[in-house]
Image (cartoon, rainbow, N blue to C red):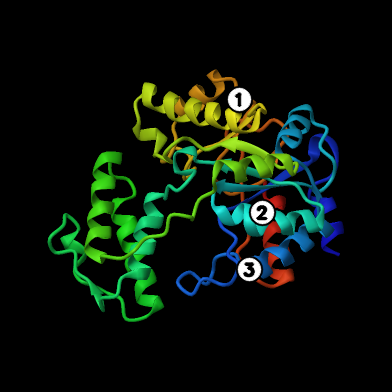
Amino acid sequence: MLRAAFRWASPTGPSARLSILIYHRVHRTPDPLFPGEVDAKVFDRQCQWLKSWFDVLPLDRAVRLLARGELPARAASITFDDGYADNHDVALPILQRHGLSATFFIATGFLDGGRMWNDTVIEAVRRCRAPALDLARTELAGLGPLALGDDGQRRAAAEGIIRAIKYRPPVERQALVDAVADTAAADLPTGLMMRSDQVHALHRAGMQIGPHTRSHPILARLDRAAAIDEVAGSREQLEAITGAPMPVFAYPNGKPGEDYSAETVAIVRELGFEAAVSTAWGAARYGADPFQLPRFTPWDRSQWRFGLRLLHNVAQA
């Protein structure tokens, strides 16, 4: 039934819609701190559903067909952002088992032992042994002592810190992250992100690789030279790792007008990319701006709820 409904909502040709799904991590087992995040069992089920409902295409091929009005019915692409090691270790075998392709957008500055700033906050809170995180001696003193008595409190603490510093200038943000880590006094992991050889292995396995900047900044808040360096530098590093061209880019965070601007879009176009993806909800249709393609993944765990929410996203595009 859902397969027929997706064909109705997204027929072939100029009336087609392209559903681009976005993922970040695929945990081996459920994360007690963030139980809503995708784990291996959930992702395996979702891949099974997607294969039965959609014609899943590599993203670069899909955007070219979209631009020509030649998409097949029920077209979809799968994407991952950031470059987590579990993309290679956990997600890749599942994709291969289902015969599916995906595009992995990599923030190259965190390869080979790096760690994204938000993960430093999350892991500092997760691993802190104190019953509360007291940030009174930092610029985040206004958050007050943050209770860490259970996973719910730890999750709330991490989310509150991230909200407070997400849009600070990069240098200031990093200083606050360091202060949180120092206060937590916890041993932090160094293997959360992929190594360069794992990126290469994804490419060899037939997956597409794309740039996601060097340091995952808010591009709208950078000057032109810095934004160009972030985008072009990421692409150059990935081309060196894979030996392959990089036709598609993903904006960090990805909210139009907030995380990237019209100038950012112009830079990506000028650098020779064919398309770019955002995190705005929706499905792309013929004539859509190829440099602001929407992405959406339902958060539901049941097959019918997941499918119906995804169908609604396609039908309203």
- Spot the residue most to the left: 137
Residue 269, by quadrant, is top right
What type is the residue that disc 3 sits on?
A: Asp
Mark closest to the chain's N terminus, 2 or 1:
1
Pick the front one: 51 or 215: 215
Q: Position of residue 250 (x, y in %)?
A: 55, 38
- Using the image, tell me which numbered label, if any, was put on residue 300: 3
Q: Secondary structure at mark 2?
A: helix
Pick the front one: 76 or 151: 151
The residue drawn where x is 63% and y is 52% is 88
- Position of 199 relative to 93 (above/below): above
Mark 1 highlights which residue? 273
Q: In the rendered view of the protein, which quadrant contains the N terminus?
A: bottom right
Mark 2 highlights which residue? 313
- Assess whether mark 1 and mark 2 are in contact (beta carbons under 8 angstroms): no
Residue 146 is left or right of residue 50, and the answer is left
Mark closest to the chain's N terminus, 1 or 3:
1
Q: Secondary structure at mark 1?
A: loop
Q: Position of residue 142 (x, y in %)?
A: 17, 62
Neighbours of disc 2 within 10 Å: few (<14), some (14-19), many (20+)? some
- Spot the residue most to the bottom: 149
What type is the residue that disc 2 sits on?
A: Asn
Q: Position of residue 214 (x, y in %)?
A: 45, 35
